[in-house]
């Protein structure tokens, strides 16, 4: 439902987005992850027709955004960076205006405005000027206008930015509920958001895609993914060390702050945890805790997006 081919944008002779190609299918929530200035917003602006690409193409539901702009824009809802709105309008007034622009009228117009107010939980501020709303409510007004015409494709630029933890939870729940029927592209630099929400992640750095995978596959790139930590007192470590090497699936053992860490042979993470847990019980090791590390997205994010990185 979203398809980009070698999308490129050049400002002042510099490619800020370069050869970005990806697709998003119905039912997918694609997380667009990258550091500040990586090119996320610029890519989204090109897909929505807000900015013309220097090279490359973007299609929404098969319609080319440059040559079939209106047809493509009819199918998409867009929450731009910062959720801009007309501050002197109320949420109700703004949604009415957007409904008119979108060509909605009569009962359908009323129904869609009501649904958007409910979905974005705006009922308590329906008639309050947007300028006087808190940052969180302003963002929800932006979300409501993006959802208003029940589009097939949603492009949301940092949808939870500025929201408190409860509001973040509500917006993520809403996005998850809509996901089955839509193709959704969200940009974020909140790593936990990717795990909480996204079925797939594109990592972008300096304008180029450096990873395209599921959040779990990203976690697998952490060298400590699947490593088992044994909390053991310093005095007991030397005696335990040789035994750990013998556990099926153990690749290497090293000391850590909490005790000892056993790294797994790739693909044998489950064997390693089972073997260590069993040995600890049956041999009565002086270990107070055994747990397996999932890997950390921030470690992977840094390795992919740090200036020296050339990962693909
Ligand atoms: N109109 C413009 N003119 C010149 N440079 C621009 C313009 N718009 C964006 N840029 C530059 O393009 C690069 C990518 O910006 P973009 O806003 O797409 O990044 P981003 O990944 O969305 O960052 P953030 O997470 O901070 O929102 C930045 O270096 C930015 O300064």
Image (cartoon, grey):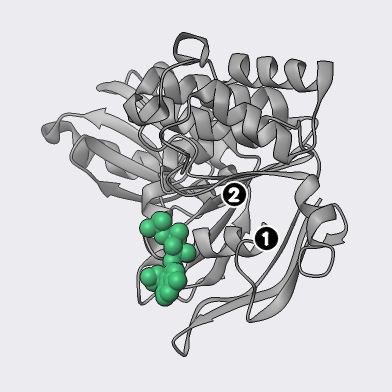
Q: In the visual, does 1 lie left or right of 37? A: right
SS class of the residue under badge 2? helix
Q: Is residue 288 visible?
A: yes
Q: Give neighbour class at mark 1: few <14, some 14-19, many 20+ (Cα, 10 Å).
A: many
- Kindly give the residue lying farthest to the left in the view shown: 235
Q: Is the residue indicated by label 1 positioned so its CB lies within 8 Å of ligand 1?
A: no
Residue 42, percent from left and from top? 53, 64
Vertical comparison of 263 with 178: above or below: below
Q: Secondary structure at mark 1?
A: helix
Residue 38 at x, y percent in the picture = 44, 66
Question: Distance between the Cα atoms at labels 1 and 2?
Answer: 26 Å
**Residue situated in front as seen by the camera: 57 or 286:** 57
Q: Which mark is residue 135?
A: none
Structural crowding at the residue carrying mark 2, measured as other residues with C-alpha within 10 Å and reported as few (<14), some (14–19) or many (≥20): few
Q: Which label sits on residue 47?
A: 1
Residue located 42% across and 25% down the image = 137
Compared to residue 256, the image places residue 233 above or below, namely above
- The residue to which callout 2 is attached is 217
Query: What is the quadrant of residue 292 in the picture?
Result: top left
């Amino acid at each position: 439902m979203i398809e980009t081919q070698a999308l490129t944008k050049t400002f002042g002779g510099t490619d800020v987005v370069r050869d970005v190609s990806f697709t998003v299918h119905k039912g997918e929530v694609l997380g667009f992850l990258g550091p500040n200035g990586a090119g996320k917003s610029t890519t989204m602006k090109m897909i929505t027709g807000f900015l013309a690409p220097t090279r490359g193409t973007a299609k929404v539901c098969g319609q080319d955004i440059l040559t079939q702009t209106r047809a493509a824009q009819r199918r998409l809802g867009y929450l731009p960076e910062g959720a801009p709105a007309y501050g002197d309008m109320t949420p109700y007034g703004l949604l009415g205006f957007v409904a008119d622009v979108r060509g909605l009228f009569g009962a359908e117009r009323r129904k869609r405005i009501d649904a958007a107010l409910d979905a974005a939980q705006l009922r308590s501020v329906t008639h309050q000027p947007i300028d006087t709303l808190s940052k969180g409510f302003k963002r929800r007004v932006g979300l409501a206008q993006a959802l208003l015409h029940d589009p097939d494709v949603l492009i949301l630029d940092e949808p939870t930015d500025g929201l408190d933890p409860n509001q973040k939870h509500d917006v993520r729940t809403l996005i998850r509920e809509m996901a089955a029927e839509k193709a959704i592209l969200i940009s974020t630099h909140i790593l936990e958001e990717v795990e909480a929400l996204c079925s797939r992640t594109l990592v972008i750095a300096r304008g180029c895609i450096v990873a395209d995978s599921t959040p779990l596959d990203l976690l697998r790139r952490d060298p400590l993914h699947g490593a088992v930590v044994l909390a053991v007192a310093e005095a007991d470590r030397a005696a335990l060390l040789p035994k750990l090497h013998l556990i099926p699936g153990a690749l290497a053992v090293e000391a850590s702050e909490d005790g000892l860490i056993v790294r797994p042979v790739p693909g044998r993470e489950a064997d390693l945890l089972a073997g260590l847990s069993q040995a600890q019980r049956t041999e009565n090791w002086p270990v107070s805790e055994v747990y397996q590390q999932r890997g950390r997205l921030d470690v992977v994010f840094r390795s992919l997006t740090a200036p020296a990185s050339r990962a693909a």
